Image (cartoon, rainbow, N blue to C red):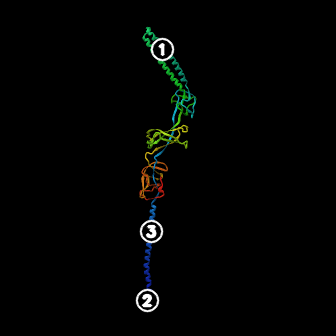
Amino acid sequence: MTRESRSQQDARHIPGRNRILWFLVVPIALCCFGAITFLVRAQSERKLVATTQASAIESVSIIHAQPSPLETDLALPATLEAFSDSPIYARTDGYVKRWYADIGTQVHQGQLLAVIDSPEVDQQLNQARASLAQAQATLKLAGITAARYQGLINTDAVSQQDVDVNNQNLDAQRANAQAASAAVSRLEQMQGFEKVTAPFDGTITQRLTDVGDLINAGNGGTGHELFRIAKINVIRAYVTVPETYSAQIIDGMKATLHVTGLAGQQFNGKVIRNSHAIAMNSHTLLVEIDVPNPSGRLMPGAYAEAHIRVPVPVRSMLIAGGAVLYQSAGPQVALVNEAGQVELRSVVLGRDFGSSIEITRGINPGDSIIASPPDYLVNGMKVSIHAAASEQKS
């Protein structure tokens, strides 16, 4: 075969080779492209899973509970009262002739406050004095007669019966004179009640009478109360202490008063006594605090806030108020355990101080508490802790 014929034969086989080559290259290229696409997609899925898992871990900050102080400051509402507060009544009937003290007057014990005109008592006293004089004269005559009869008995001029009768008459007249003297003394005292005086040192807080008013003796009837007097050199403040702290209240404890009308001023006193009984309706203990008031700045009836520092019966834990979850299961706190998982724990709340709240039962000092837990936290949920925030304290 000539060279020319060979060349022509090879030329006829080239298109067939090219077709076989294309049938081999294209599937291989497609396989390579699919493998590359699969690898890229798998890598993207792994990144997505990692990103999803990272975003599923909640980032939280934690706080640690602090023990409550050994003492607590009880701030309780109080109403101030005078150490002694008494109404002044008349002891005799009549009309007010004159009064000498008005509201705000400082008076002393025995000081004259008013004068009552009682003409009936004056006339009764005059009559009683006349009756006393008559009884004394009759008594004198009975004494002379009894002595005369006693002297005649030895001469048999009179009988023993006559002597006994005159001696008995002497005793009766003596009794009549004593009764008349007692009547005079009673009316003299009644006349003395025409002068109304102060029963103790104090301040007149009310004047409820005027010149010419009809006065009835005692505490009944129209115009019965003339004055009201208060002793305010010492002020009493009555407070009701919750039953929880009743056992810690001891006579002699220091207390302070902050009066609404005297802002910025503090008045020191002490617990004097308590009722030693818990009120059934309010479960509180009535406590009396006495506060010296020499300047008279504290006024009866004023509203005040009493502060008493009492030892805490059972120490509790304090946490931030925002760390408590209020859900259907009751108040709870979210803890982070050693595995980095959420643990919801029910707690018993004590007093609410605003920025912090007292936990009486349910947590321990070393617990890691989530500071501001979201509502969707559940038990076993993975969380991550901010390194900086973990040093915060409640």
Give the image quarter of residue 100. top right
Pointer 3 or 2: first along the chain: 2
Q: Which mark is residue 143?
A: 1
Q: CA distance from mark 2 to mark 1?
A: 198 Å
Residue drawn at the location 44% of the way across and 78% of the way down: 25
Where disc 1 sits, the SS reads: helix
Disc 3 to disc 1, C-alpha distance: 143 Å
Answer few, some or many: residues within 10 Å of disc 1's Cα (few below 14, many 20 plus, some between 14 and 19): some
Report the residue marked by disc 3. Answer: 43
Give the amino acid type for the residue marked by disc 2 in the picture. Arg
> Which sits earlier in the primary sequence, circle 3 or circle 1?
3
Tag 2 and tag 1, C-beta contact below 8 Å: no
Give whichever of 148, 24 is nearer the camera. Answer: 148
Rendered location of residue 124, percent (x, y): 53, 22
Whether residue 329 is visible here, answered yes or no, is no
Name the residue tied to disc 2: 6
Residue 234, given in percent of the width and then of the height, sits at: 52, 37
Circle 2 crowding by C-alpha within 10 Å: few under 14, some 14–19, many from 20 = few
Q: What secondary structure is found at the residue carrying circle 2? A: helix
Disc nearer the start of the sequence (2/1): 2
Q: Which mark is residue 255?
A: none
Mark 3–mark 1 CB contact (< 8 Å): no
Tell me if 104 is positioned left or right of 52 in this view. Answer: right
Where is residue 109? Give x, y as percent. 53, 31
Give coordinates of residue 274: x percent, y percent.
46, 38
Q: Quadrant of the N terminus?
A: bottom left
Residue located 42% across and 53% down the image: 345
Tell me, yes or no, whether the two marked residues, 3 and 2, touch with CB atoms within 8 Å: no
Q: Amino acid at mark 3?
A: Gln
Three-letter residue code for mark 1: Gly
Please tell me whether mark 3 sits on a helix, a strand or a loop. helix
